[in-house]
Image (cartoon, rainbow, N blue to C red):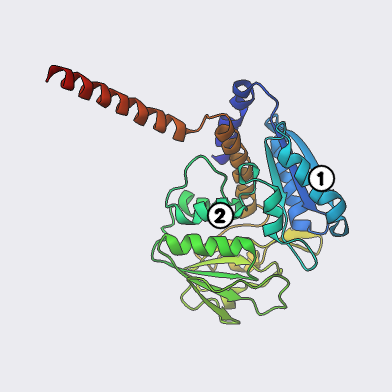
Amino acid sequence: MLYRRCTKELEPLAERCGDTLRLGIITLTSDEQNVAFASKVQSLAAKLGIEVMEERVAARNIGRKFIPALRDWSKDDLVHGVLLLYEPEENMPPLSDIFCIMPWEKDVAGAHFYNVGRYTVEPKPRCDYPLPVEAAAVIEILKHYQIPAKKKHVVIVGEGKSFERVLMQKLCNIGCRVTSRIPDVEPTGIQPVSMQYSRTKSAPVNEGGEVVISCVNHAGYFTRSRLSRNSIVIDNGYNFFRGRIGGDVDFNSVQNWVKAITPVPGGVKSVAHLIALLNFARIIKARYGLTGEDKKKDQLVRRFHQVDKKLEANRERI
């Protein structure tokens, strides 16, 4: 369904814009998860006729290659969007410095503070800015399978990365009761600041969690003992274990135990790949004035002029 939407929106854009659609992808070689994400987006983009330029940079070369490539593509009008896959670690530039270089209008990942802020606040996202890809993918899965999230107890288990913080705020704003829990394994990420949710360490996940969202990145972390039979599990983990790609859930033992579960590979990541391409389409439409928001504005302007003409005619009669 999402792939058909991508095809429907992207294929006619090159003709309407009169230019080749170009997408830049920048990622760190040390992050296997983001490298795999970039490769999948690149293959999907190639099928849709998008010219992709990829820059994979080692962490030690951030100052020499990463920042210059980001600066050049951000200023280049021939590059329509930039997919930046970057989770800052120790001795790396923070996101605030990165987003001073890249404008929010080109942010295909939707991670820019401006895009995140609008997405978390607006009940129904408008068409003139890109969405945070992984958070939007989770919401899309809930909508597609008609899982009403409002007033449900959602448990998010992870290390407090940017995806979790965005999703927590979005779920809080649509009326969910959100509990964030730190996994009882050695953390590798950045711990989040306090927000509108409770945060508990090493608590059993199956205590009242109607929807469980996992982003631990630890293979086999979730077993039957951690999940109740009423749980809906959304697995956003990504691990290389015994030569295979898998999530945080022991899928074979849990799939007949819980109410529903997303697979890995597939699931959230496969939806996020398509959300990134839909973001690319949003960026191009906003740049060339092809969004539905512009049509709504034009309709309002026309109505205003019609009312204004009627008022002037009435004044002349008087």
Relative to 89, say whether 290 is above or below. above
**Farthest residue, direction left:** 318
Where in the figure is residue 80, as x and y percent of width and height?
Answer: 67, 35
Locate the N terminus by quadrant: top right
Q: Residue at horizontal 46%, vertical 51%?
A: 143
Badge 1 is on which residue?
55
- Residue 39, visible in the rendered structure: no
Q: Residue at horizontal 34%, vertical 25%?
A: 302
Q: Amino acid at mark 1?
A: Glu
Q: Quadrant of residue 76?
A: top right
Give whichever of 219, 36 is nearer the camera.
36
56 relative to 4 in the view: left or right:
right
Give whichever of 283, 260 is nearer the camera.
283
Relative to 166, say whether 143 is above or below. above
Q: Mark 2 falls on what kind of element?
A: helix
Where in the figure is residue 32, as x and y percent of width and height?
Answer: 79, 57
Q: Mark 1 falls on what kind of element?
A: strand
What is the distance, in whole Å, between disc 2 and disc 1 at their CAs?
24 Å
Q: Residues within 10 Å of mark 1 (few under 14, many from 20)?
A: some
Locate the C terminus by quadrant: top left
Q: Residue at horizontal 56%, vertical 50%?
A: 115
- Residue 180, visible in the rendered structure: yes
Q: Amino acid at mark 2?
A: Val
Identify the disc placed on residue 182.
none
Identify the disc placed on residue 116.
2
Q: Residues within 10 Å of mark 2 (few under 14, many from 20)?
A: many
Q: Quadrant of residue 98?
A: bottom right
